Every structure is written in C-alpha cells, then in structure tokens.
Image: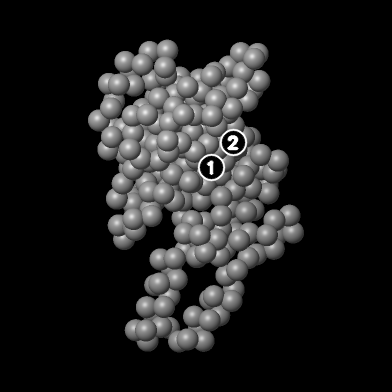
Amino acid sequence: MNQLDALSLLNSVKEGSLTPEQALLRLRLEPFEDLGYAKVDHHRGLRQGAAEVIYGAGKTPEQIAGIVAAMLQHEERNILITRMSAKAATVVSEHCDLEYHPIPRVGLVRRVEEVTASGSIAVVSGGTSDLAVCEEAALTAEALGNRVERIYDVGVAGLHRLLAHLDRLMEAKVIIAVAGMEGALASVVGGLADCPVIAVPTSVGYGASFHGLSALLSMLNSCASGVSVVNIDNGFGAGYLASMINHMGGTTK
C-alpha cells in the first residue's frame, strides 16, 4: 500500500462504499508478511512513499520470485529488483512479466511509466565504463516517478563534451554525477550547476584507484558546494535520494 492507495481507502470510507471496519481490516492486514526467509514490508510505500526494493544479490532466484509474488498480491507497482543475476531473471520471468536490464542488473515488475515530480534528474557519467552504475541510478529514479535526462561519457578527459550539455544541466532539479578513476567529474558539475549534486564513485580504474576508493575520497573532498557522496557503485542509493529531493516540492498527482 502506498500513500495514494491510503487516500483512496479513506475516500471510499468517506463516500460510503467501504465501512470503517472494512478499512481497518485492510490496514491491519497490510504491515508485513512473513515468508519464512523474508518479512515483506507492505507498509513501506505508506510510510516512505515508495514500495520496498528487493536487493537481489545473496538471494536465491526462488526467494526473489517469492517476494515478488507477495508484493504482486498486494497490488504493488514498479517493483524494483537491484543486483539481479541473469539466472534469477530467468526464474522470475517464468512467474510474472519481468523487464530485465542486464548491464545494470536491474529488474522491474509491473512497470507503470508515470511521472509524479515536476522537476527532472540528470544522470551524468564520466565514461561508458560507468554505464552499469548510471543505469541503476536512472532506472531507480524512473521507477520512482521521475523524468530522467541521461548525459553519458562526458568526463574531464574531454571537458567540451560536458559543456555541450550545459542547458540540460541547468534545467535539472538534481544531478547524479557518476565517475571512476580520480572522480573529478563531481567537482566540475558541482561548479556549474545551481542544484544538489549527488556524486557516485565507481570501482572503474587502474590499480591505485583501489576499486573506487580514490574516486570516493576525491568526491568527499570536493571544493564545489552542494556536492554529497554515496557509497562506491551505489547507483540505487543515488537514484533514490535524487527522487526524494525531486519530490520535495510536491507531486504532480
């Protein structure tokens, strides 16, 4: 149940098509469902505005399928599965209509393309090698009701590529800057934009990049104002936070 569902339930009581006792029963049945291997939080959407997201790594394909089935029974939409293996995608697709993106390893079930925030989110990448993390961020933001602008392969090795998209950067309400190597892109974007910048260090790079630690430390030490940093390769976290910021002015519905 999400916040719109709760409002619809209350309106049904107000209009007389549902008794208060029936509404109470619906609410009491909602909080969570114990599957033995997982406790599915059906109240997540009501509390936080977005349904529970399934982290696929470490779960068996059958466990993922079971969690998805429980969420579908509660009429959840845009069920997001991150770090999902191709094997798990094959199993889950046998039970439901799954949209699978192999590069970011993201799965979406019962996807409904709707934009509920008035602003846009720009996802900017340093290079094509950062694409998996970028798409995890972009797909997360889209699943949460945001319009996303993708600006890829515009790293500091060729700054003119980024400057060619200044108008799109200026129009964004939030920018996600994704980069590996030395992670300089976040500081450059932060110095050009007047909106919050969420920096995502990636594990792309050679030996002394220490699997993304170099980019992480560089972004944490950015001299540009308005830059915040999430964990290495955490495209999901960046997309979720960007969505929260983008919805702070209210929804379009």
Residue at image position (28%, 34%) is 170
Q: Point out residue 119 in the picture as x, y percentages from the top left corner.
A: 31, 46
Residue 149 horizontal side relative to residue 232, left or right: left
Q: What's the coloring here?
A: one colour
Q: Give above or below for 205 relative to 50.
A: above
Q: Earlier in the sequence, mark 1 or mark 2?
A: 2
**Looking at this view, is 223 or 50 the one in front?**
223
Q: Taking 119 as reference, is 90 left or right?
A: right
Which residue is tagged 2?
A: 231
Q: Secondary structure at mark 2?
A: loop
Dot label at residue 222: none
Which of 98/166 is in front? 166
Q: Splitting the image into 4 quarters, where does residue 70 fall?
A: bottom right
Q: Which residue extends farthest right? A: 36
The Cα–Cα distance between marks 1 and 2, rounded to whole angstroms, is 8 Å
Marks 1 and 2 in Cβ contact (< 8 Å): yes
Residue 43 percent location from the top left of the image: 55, 65
| Residue count near mark 1 (Cα–Cα under 10 Å), binned few <14, some 14–19, many ≥20 | some
Question: Which residue sits at x=55%, y=80%?
Answer: 25
Residue located 56% across and 44% down the image: 81
Q: Is residue 42 above or below residue 162?
A: below
